Image (cartoon, helix red, strand yellow):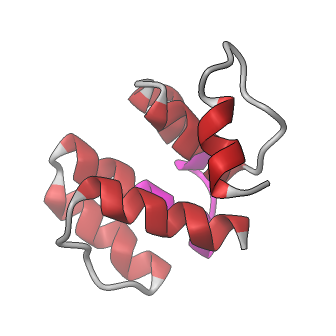
Amino acid sequence: MTPAQFHASLAAETPPTLSPPLLALWRDAKGDWDGAHKCVDTSAETQAMWVHAYLHRREGDLGNAGYWYARAGRPPATGPLGQEFEEILAVLLG
């Protein structure tokens, strides 16, 4: 899947088959923060922890976000949320 295909999939009512971190991004893009959080809140995978950090940053909980950035081995993001979303998406899609 390409980033363009991912974005096109957002027009659908239901998500395509995606890994939990990608599904979290999909749900977040659809405005379902709680559903997105549930996709990654118990995962010990580095990519899921990065998405988890992004989600807490989006909600404005920077302390919690900082914890998850550290767990993911990444510095806390400071740029626009949309830019971070696209960066994560690109990495997850390989």
Asked whether, in this view, residue 80 is left or right of residue 88, the answer is left
- The residue shown at (26%, 47%) is 58
- Taking 76 as reference, is 19 above or below it? above
Place of residue 22 in the rendered image (x, y in percent of width and height, measured from the top left): 65, 50
Place of residue 5 in the rendered image (x, y in percent of width and height, measured from the top left): 71, 45
Place of residue 78 in the rendered image (x, y in percent of width and height, measured from the top left): 17, 72
Residue 90 visible within the image: yes
Residue situated in front as seen by the camera: 79 or 49: 79
Check residue 46 for magenta coloring.
yes
Place of residue 6 in the rendered image (x, y in percent of width and height, measured from the top left): 66, 44
Asked whether, in this view, residue 1 is left or right of residue 73, the answer is right
Q: Main secondary structure of the magenta part?
A: helix
Q: Which residues are magenta?
A: 39-53
- Taking 82 as reference, is 7 above or below it? above
Residue 45 visible within the image: no
Quarter of the image holding residue 64? bottom left
Asked whether, in this view, residue 36 is left or right of residue 62, the answer is right
Check residue 86 for magenta coloring.
no
- Taking 77 as reference, is 57 above or below it? above
Q: Quadrant of the C terminus?
A: bottom right
* Count of residue discs: 0
Q: Quadrant of the N terminus?
A: bottom right
Asked whether, in this view, residue 52 is left or right of residue 60, the answer is right
- The residue shown at (32%, 53%) is 82
Residue at the top extreme?
Answer: 13
Quarter of the image holding residue 68? bottom left
Residue situated in front as seen by the camera: 62 or 26: 26
- The residue shown at (84%, 38%) is 17
